[in-house]
Image (cartoon, rainbow, N blue to C red):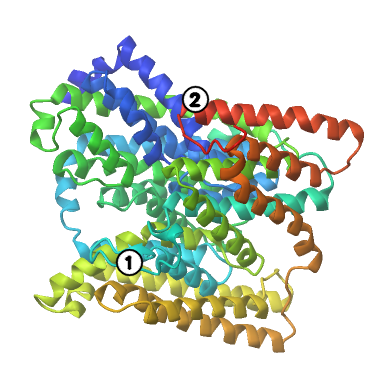
Amino acid sequence: MEFFQFFGDVLTLEIMVVLVLATGAGLVLGAMPGLSPTMAVALLIPFTFHMDSATGLVLLGAVYTATVAGGAISGILVNIPGAPANIATVLDGHPMARQGRASEALHYCFISSFIGGVIGVLVLIFFTPPLAELALAFGPAELFWIAIVGVTVIGSVGSKSVVKGLLSGAAGLWISTIGISPIFGEARFVFTDHVTGGVHVVAALIGLFAIPQVFQLMVTAREKNTGSLYSLESHRLFDSIRYNLRRIKALVVGTVSGIVVGIIPGAGGQIAGLVAYDQVRKFSGEPDRFGKGEPDGVIAAESANNAMVGPSLVPLLTLGVPGSPTAAVLLGGLLINGLFPGPDLFTVHAQVTWTFIGALLVAQGLMVVMGLGLSRTSSHWVMRVPSHYMAAAVTVLAVIGTYSIQNSYSDVLVMAVLGAVMYVGSRYGFSAAPMVLGIILGPIAEDNFQMGKMIADTGEGALSYFFLGTINIILIVICVVSIAYSIVAELKQRRRSVAGDVESDPPRLAGSVGAVGLVALMLGAAFFAGSGEAFFFPRLLALIMTALAALLLWDSFRALKAGGDSGPSDGVWRDIATGSAVIVVYLTVLEVLGFYASSFLAFALIALFYLPSRDRSSVVRLLPVSIVFIGIVYLSFEHMLQVMTPRGILF
């Protein structure tokens, strides 16, 4: 086979040096909030201009592989996924970290990533032609249902309440429609210039995960009155490897999910991880353990999002249709080097293609070795960072990470607003994961829905087009079964809660009323902001959210009669008020004082206010820590990543 004929080219000194550097860089970039795999690959494309075709593609491929796995580091340690593909990993990975099992969780992450990644690349090597034909079977209707499957799965498993999860997911889909309609070119819900370009996916990801985490860290610093973030228990690597290899069900479910989803054009690792998580939870027999630090959740999610990498390149290399957003950027890398998808890649340019694929296989091995080393170091240091410093650091990194996406101050404001709303929602049982996924999958769902509707209007009609066909029926059944299963599981948990066997999160009237108010605003905007085909999809979503909000309100009234309504204490709100004020001032003076001057002040003020004890030594230590941190941020973003930030009047 040609793969073995050209594999020797991967082992040359030049390729191996590039692989080592690219894998290390990918792991670090993946762990940084805001730098998704797509952005990391895009940032490194200019470096390939002076390389030969094979070396340039090896660089991009290794970074792609490593950033998908590296995003789990920040997700597990500080509850901020480095990339959308790591959303499912956070559901159990971060609870493990809070239990002092961060090293164990990171071990499972990289070991399962390696297993899934290797199998995914082997699928790419040996099964490319038949899988390319399967990819062609997915048209607009099938891709629409794929997006809906992703939202319903995370809406069902990512929240303690099915209604709250589905409502969050639908709200995310609705938020994704803000801006200019990509099909009709019409502005929708642009109530301020800051959202003219819509809500960027990475800005939403950072805001919905990072800002609530900042507020939680502030509360933790005040409540615990201790220096360390969490405790950290040591865990032997050999024990992790042995346990991981025994989790056959989680590995198989994760890997198969990743392969299947990877082949589907445009689906991406976020759907792969969530589908795998949902399926392994259903097959476990003990679904209540998930979301509380269950290793199988981490293993399934990470094996899935890395198994997706190889198959996502199948439609790219054979048909020119990317299987994920990052694969779309890789397509640009191919075209820049004069390589066009199709049969010629495996005949005329066989050496370049097979060297690239072989390097992906080697990169999996480098990723697990370097990732395990990095996980040991990162967990050791991050878990010992005091909560007040961590809150200040995450705030600054969230702002610069968001700004670096498009060099846009508007993205920063959108990120902060979404984060503040999500924190309030999280105190009442709403989850960030469904909303983020709704925003990510919204364009896929809407574009394919509108295209499918146009096709259906010229043929058999929308009902037949969207609800008939083998693939459509399978996907619809998955949606229904996922929701039904979660409803049954929630009802069982409530009965056990009444009996006193387990704790349950009761519906809260205040949160339900707030959710109903937001849905009413969305409903009013959808029906009065404009008319025409461009508003059909958001209006449909608004009606669905109205029905879900009504169910939630009814459930809350029932809980109130039973005496089950409770909410966050007034002390919690008072405690985060000062931190919120500092963040508002920080964002207000960002462009006036300059990014680094205002970031220094914000870091110092947040850390100072939440110091466990304001003795002289602690206050004196604060100044050099602030200077060193901002210095590292400046060197990283200004010089290494060349992000142009607001200079202001000071710097």
Q: Foreground residue, 5 or 51? A: 51
Picture layout, residue 509 above or below residue 2: below
Q: Position of residue 575 (x, y in %)?
A: 78, 58
Compute the Cα span from label 1 to label 2.
Answer: 37 Å
Give the mark nearer the N terminus: 1 vs 2. 1
Q: Position of residue 117 (x, y in %)?
A: 37, 37
Left or right of 110? Residue 126 is left
Q: Position of residue 511 (x, y in %)?
A: 63, 75
User: Residue placed at 37% from the left, 32% from the top?
Assistant: 43
Q: Amino acid under label 1?
A: Ala
Left or right of 649? Residue 533 is left
| Residue 187: image tag | 1
Residue situated furthest front in the rendering: 649
* Mark 1 neighbour class, 10 Å CA radius: few under 14, some 14 to 19, many 20 or more: many
Q: Which residue is mark 2?
A: 639
* Mark 2 neighbour class, 10 Å CA radius: few under 14, some 14 to 19, many 20 or more: few
User: Residue placed at 66% from the left, 41% from the top?
Assistant: 101
